[in-house]
Amino acid sequence: MRAVFAIASDTLTLLCRRRLFWLNIWLSLGVILLVASISCSPEGWSVGFGLQSWSSGYLRRGSPWETTLFFGVIRRAVQWWVSGAVPLLALFSMASVVPKTLKSGQAALLFTKSRSRSEVLMGRFAGGLLFAAIPTLVCLIGLFLTLGWRLGVWEWHLFLALPFTLLVFAALAATTVMLGVLTKSASASLVVTLIFAASVIALQDAASRPGEIEDEGEFKGMVRASAGSVALQALAWPLPRTHDLMEGLDRSLNLHSPRLFRDLIRRWRVGKYQVGAAAADAIDANEETSSEPVTPLQLGEAVMVTSGFCGITLVMAAMMLNRRDL
């Protein structure tokens, strides 16, 4: 295990020296500052720490709409940036780790210091997880402090986004590691991983929605829809449960505002023009058409299946690495 920890530490140090890591950190700080720059006053609300302000009869300090605003913005910052963009940027750096490790010079150095090739692979994978955890944790701490500063609400449930995000990232990182062993190419492993991630999301989104009845007959349409739904669910079952995990993340945040965020968006106007209706429909389109809520049993199954996928993928990568001539 010492070799695994040493290689993980070396991987973390190597990845943190890259410019993409600091780009991830600075962009996360930018997201935090953008959210923190929003404020409400007795006259209205403003962004940019008061650089641009608007008077409002409802969105004021101490009103229910103020809580709705901050809860809605932070909830979407966690969903779109913390659990979306941050792991994606980390994956770009992670993709080149294994191919560079398999180069003749580094391979001869690392594999002679380790008892097995599997230890090197596990160390690289663990270092990549720690690498992704740093900007994720930085962003969560910033959003947590922003919520406490603006509303006086210290919502510790925000930090539950860290394990959800890392579990989804672990599935992608394990896929990238296996493809890196298979192809020895950083670009190929990254592109195929992104295609795989998009396919999993599309497949699980289709499998989670009930089939529609066809016009050729109600009974035939129901049979066709049922068969198609079962086939999609069977195909999506062994894959990482990103859909269920993101649903679980959204529920674990515990950011229940007194008003609907989309209702607040619909009220926004620029001068005499109402500009929030289309934005509200776009923001909450997924929520309005989503399937039934994920139960704790489904969430537990999602965690086990995703963890099992990571384990099986890493075992396959280790088996391929042990058979490869270096």
Image (spheres, rainbow, N blue to C red):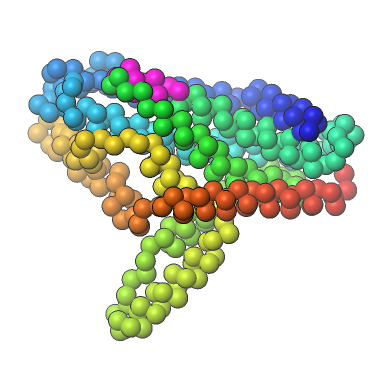
Examine the rendered structure and indicate whether residue 255 appears above or below residue 290: above
Decide whether the magenta segment is chiefly helix, strand or loop: helix
Does the image show residue 263? yes
Examine the rendered structure and indicate whether residue 235 appears above or below residue 259: below
Q: Quadrant of residue 11?
A: top right
* Residue 202 x, y percent position in the rendering: 46, 57
Does the image show residue 195? no
Q: Residue at x 85, y 52 (%)?
A: 323
Q: Residue furthest front?
A: 297
Q: Along the horizontal axis of the image, is 235 left or right of 173?
A: left
Q: Along the horizontal axis of the image, is 315 left or right of 228?
A: right
Examine the rendered structure and indicate whether residue 141 appears above or below residue 118: above
* Residue 289 x, y percent position in the rendering: 31, 56
* Residue 36 x, y percent position in the rendering: 34, 20
Position of the N terminus, as image quadrant, is top right
Q: Residue at x 79, y 37 (%)?
A: 120
Q: Which portion, as a residue range, is magenta? A: 141-150
* Residue 192 x, y percent position in the rendering: 61, 51
